[in-house]
Structures are given as structure tokens and as C-alpha cells.
Image: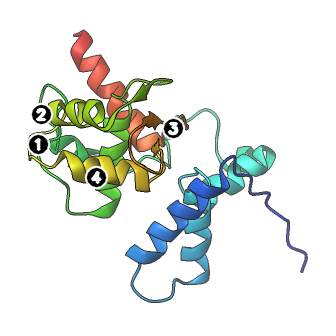
Amino acid sequence: MSRKLIPLQVSDASAFAKSLRLQLSAHEGLPSHLQFLNMLAKAAGHGNYQSLRAKADPADSEAIRPTAVPVADPEIDRKHIDRVQRSFDGEFRLMRWPSRRTDQITALWLLWSQLPSAMEMSEKEVSALLRDRHLFGDHALLRRELCELGLMSRTRDGSVYRRVERPMPIDAATILRQHSERQAN
């Protein structure tokens, strides 16, 4: 039985490793083969292993999926999106720190999207921005988490912060798009 190799490309090995570490630390025990494949795919920016396979060989996925019937995006987890949206108020401020790690990560991406890009900021400036974007009173937690997740970089002495430009995960992008559409109406 021959197996087809699925290429796994990552643009940022450090972010890939951090994402994989977070997933492994949140998992109880040793993951199964399929769970580990899904973790690798998610760390590389895919929804799961199936979406990675579909993107690796679009001819195979088209043969399986009928083109006349619209298919919901398999990467979008509606329950996850709803939970995260409930953590934000109408002004898109984070009202509470979510309890699930996946929800926390998505919330951090949404906060990241509100930070200025290509701009160096002091710790005070970052703290002030984060204070304005949340309601539970722990801007230091948010600043630290953004750095640990690789969404912000800082100098060793913590004097200069900068948003790290990365493609946003599909769930966070969906929430952001829905929020923008509500604001436009």
C-alpha cells in the first residue's frame, strides 16, 4: 500500500512550534495518531488534517465534493465562534477572559487585530491600548499572552513592543468580518 506524502509548509517555525506546544499542553495524555496529525495541521494554519489534505491535492477534494451544492466551510467551528463572540461587548471590548484555551487564543487574535501594525510602541502605550479594549482589568495578562503566542514581539528589556504580522486564523477572521458587517449596518 503506497501512501501519498502531504507537504506541510510553515512560514514561521517559531510560531508553528509555539502553537504545537500549546495544543500538546492542553491535551490530556499522549494524543492519538489522528489527533497529532490534526495538531500539526492546526499549528501550520489549517483547520484540521483533512483541510490540509484537501489543499495539498485539490483534484482529490473536488472528486469527493459535489460542486453544485454549496458546502459550509469545514474549518469554521460555529460553537467556538459563538462562545468567543459572547466574550465581547457591542464595542468589541473583551468583557471576560475565556476559560477555554482555544477561546483565549481566538480572543487574543481579535485583540491583535486592533493593535497598530508596523509601529513600535512602549509598554505604556501597549498597556493603554489593551486597557481600552477589555473590561476585566488585567492588561498585563493580555500583553504577556500576546507575546507568548507570538502575536507581539518585545525587546529583552520590555521597552519596545511591535505587532507581529501573521495571517489570521479562519475563526478569528470570521468573527472580525461579522463584527465589521454589524458595524456597517
Q: Residues within 10 Å of mark 3 (few under 14, many from 20)?
A: some
- Looking at the rendering, which quadrant does residue 114 occupy? top left
- Residue name at image x 43 percent, y 46 percent: 76
Q: Residues within 10 Å of mark 4 (few under 14, many from 20)?
A: few
Circle 1 residue: 95
Circle 3 residue: 164
Residue at the outermost right position? 2
Element type at mark 3? loop
Circle 4 residue: 79
**In this view of the protein, which residue sits in the foreground, 15 or 36?**
15
Residue at the outermost bottom position? 29
**In this view of the protein, which residue sits in the foreground, 85 or 15?**
15
Say which label, 1 or 2, has the lower sequence index: 2
Report x, y in % for residue 167.
Answer: 55, 37
Spatial CA distance of label 2 from label 3 is 25 Å
Which numbered disc, 4 or 1, marks the residue closer to the eye? Answer: 1
